[in-house]
Image (tube, rainbow, N blue to C red):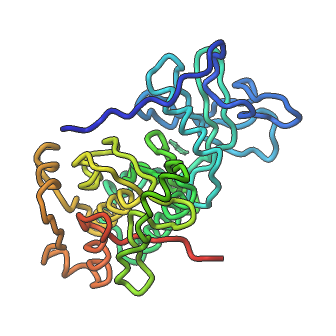
Amino acid sequence: HGGKTEPEPPPPAKGRRSLLPAGAGEAGGGRRVSMSDFEVVGYLGAGGSSQVHLVQRVGELPQRLFALKAVRKNHLSARRVAEESRILQTLRHPFIVGLHYAFEDEIRLYLVLSYAGGGDLLAQLERHGRVAEPAARLCFAEVVSALSYLHTQQVLYRDLKPENLLLGHDGHILLADFGVSKRLVQQQRTQQQTQQQPRPPLDRKDSSGGALRDGTTPHRACCGDAATSTMVGTPAYMAPEVVLGHEYSYAADWWSAGILLHELLTNEAPFSDQSIAGLWNHLRRPGLCFRVSAEDRKRMSEAACDLIEKLLVADASARASWRPLPH
Ligand code: ADE
């Protein structure tokens, strides 16, 4: 498919067997947390190579439940989980799963995450079918809030899909699984380079009166033209620029958001094909332009159709996106 392989996060420094940054997993008073601080009270499932257990802290009152994600350090994906921990440590948002502790022993790496007791959106869609528009609107607004916050933190999420959207007991969204997320670091330019190549103006295409912005460079101050080109994510949610192996940036997450919104409202994928190859051939077509079907149009508001069509725009620089409202 022409995609590149994601370079593994850097190996730990020589002589250090730890995958986690120093300071992760402090229990207070400088003592490090370990598995002996937790008792396992349930099993939540497996995600790839990791196991997720329901745990609580020994002796803590009132008792709080956490999701404990454990991965074997000798497994290839351990580096990804370590990177996930590094990213989550810097984030704090009501609709993003919180990382409470990260620690390791000789064999495994552990992340202690906030527990979402309401299952995931994929299970909801499978059980109850499409989501009524008022509920979908709230759910999608929470996803937008989480994604636009991530982008201000220079984090490209890269795996937006219903199974990564957990529901808290209160019914609110918790975005989880940062296993393929990436912090985009703007290339450092030397003064000479900056003088030679003046940067293009940002927000070139903003035809929507200010509410929706150019997706590739949504945040003038922090994001600049930071980008990546590794083919990462889940095929059905990948933006055309990802599939094509082009450089891509935050706009790729907004494409996935368009797929998600279509799925929430119709319980069907907007681009369906028998095979990944067929789907990708479709996404690679020049001039690709998505239109909500006449049948779906009858069931959805004009605003919802319009939003889906503005997100599923093949040209990343013309795709709808959001930046957070100023405080
Ligand atoms: N499965 C994976 N992560 C989880 C979490 N944070 N809460 C509940 N179930 C999960």
Q: Give the quadrant of the N terminus.
A: top left
**Is residue 323 in view?**
yes
Residue 198 falls in which quadrant of the image?
A: bottom left
As rendered, which of 239 and 191 lies closer to the eye? 191
Residue 56 place in picture, x, y as percent: 70, 37
Q: Residue at x 75, y 29 (%)?
A: 33
Q: Residue at x 49, y 57 (%)?
A: 194
Residue 314 falls in which quadrant of the image?
A: bottom left
**Is residue 171 in view?**
no
108 vs 199: above or below: above
287 vs 119: above or below: below
Q: Residue at x 29, y 83 (%)?
A: 301
1 vs 210: above or below: above
As rendered, which of 139 and 315 lies closer to the eye? 315
As rendered, which of 157 and 226 lies closer to the eye? 226
118 horizontally vs 92: left or right: left
Q: Residue at x 43, y 41 (%)?
A: 180
Residue 270 falls in which quadrant of the image?
A: bottom left
Residue that sits furthest to the bottom in the current view: 209
As rendered, which of 295 and 102 lies closer to the eye? 102
Residue 277 place in picture, x, y as percent: 13, 43
82 horizontally vs 252: left or right: right
Residue that sits furthest to the top in the current view: 15
Residue 75 place in picture, x, y as percent: 46, 20
Q: Give the quadrant of the C terminus.
A: bottom right
200 vs 210: above or below: above
Residue 115 place in picture, x, y as percent: 60, 47
322 horizontally vs 82: left or right: left
